[in-house]
């Protein structure tokens, strides 16, 4: 029998990370000055509301942050993120497709289409590139599971991803 106390437990915030594709481009959000991640590119996403399904949240966040109505929304992976700006997050990584490139900004920032070939030139969180690579490399019907650890801010200490 395990002997544990409530102090052994922690609370995680459920969030989505959404990669929206149009041809060879992916939509990213450049954080505005009100964000901890000001000037850094990140996929669209956000907190999952109580009672909200993961894929419904992904479509809602994409619509709210970019104005896009998307198709083919899929769960691609789940990453337990530790100590990202002091937060514990259960990140549901999703993908979607857009037939249009017309986007609008939001309080989060201005979404921008970025060529998959130009990622090396972006100021982007260190975990986004390997997560995106796993999304792009996944076989249909598969998902990946991962764990990451940050330094309490935006410095990635490790990321471990396994295909399930």
Image (cartoon, rainbow, N blue to C red):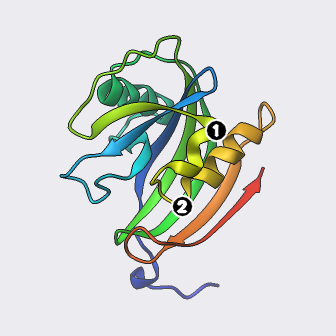
Q: Is residue 107 visible?
A: yes
Question: What label sits on residue 126 in the rendered view?
Answer: 2
The furthest residue to the top: 99
> How many numbered marks have been drawn onto this rendered protein structure?
2
The furthest residue to the bottom: 3
At a point 53% along the width and 11% down the height, the residue shown is: 99
Q: Is residue 48 visible?
A: no
Dot 1, how many residues are within 10 Å of its Cα: few (below 14), some (14-19), or many (20+)? few
Q: Earlier in the sequence, mark 1 or mark 2?
A: 1
Q: Position of residue 65 (x, y in %)?
A: 32, 31
At a point 61% along the width and 84% down the height, the residue shown is: 2
Q: Position of residue 70 (x, y in %)?
A: 48, 17
At a point 58% along the width and 51% down the height, the residue shown is: 120
The furthest residue to the front: 121
Question: What label sits on residue 44 in the rendered view?
Answer: none
Name the residue that disc number 1 marks.
117
Q: Relative to 94, is 35 above or below? A: below
Q: On the rendered image, what quadrant is the N terminus found in? A: bottom right
- The quarter holding residue 160 reads bottom right
Q: Position of residue 43 (x, y in %)?
A: 46, 42
Q: Position of residue 67 (x, y in %)?
A: 33, 20
Is 107 or 86 nearer to us in this picture? Answer: 107
Q: Helix, strand or loop at disc 2?
A: loop
Q: Is residue 158 left or right of residue 18?
A: right
Q: Nearer the viewer, mark 1 or mark 2?
A: 1
Q: Relative to 120, is 88 above or below? A: below
């Amino acid at each position: 029998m395990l002997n544990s106390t409530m102090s052994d437990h922690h609370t995680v915030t459920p969030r989505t990370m959404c990669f929206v594709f149009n041809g060879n481009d992916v939509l990213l959000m450049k954080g505005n000055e009100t964000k901890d991640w000001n000037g850094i590119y990140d996929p669209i996403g956000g907190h999952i509301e109580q009672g909200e399904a993961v894929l419904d949240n992904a479509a809602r966040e994409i619509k709210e942050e970019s104005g896009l109505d998307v198709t083919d929304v899929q769960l691609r992976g789940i990453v337990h993120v530790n100590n990202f700006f002091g937060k514990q997050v259960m990140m549901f990584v999703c993908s979607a497709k857009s037939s249009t490139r017309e986007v609008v900004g939001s309080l989060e920032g201005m979404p921008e289409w970025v060529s998959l070939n130009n990622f090396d030139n972006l100021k982007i969180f260190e975990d986004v590139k390997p997560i995106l690579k796993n999304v792009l490399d996944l076989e249909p019907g598969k998902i990946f599971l991962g764990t990451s650890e940050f330094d309490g801010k935006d410095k990635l200490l490790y990321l471990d991803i396994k295909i399930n």
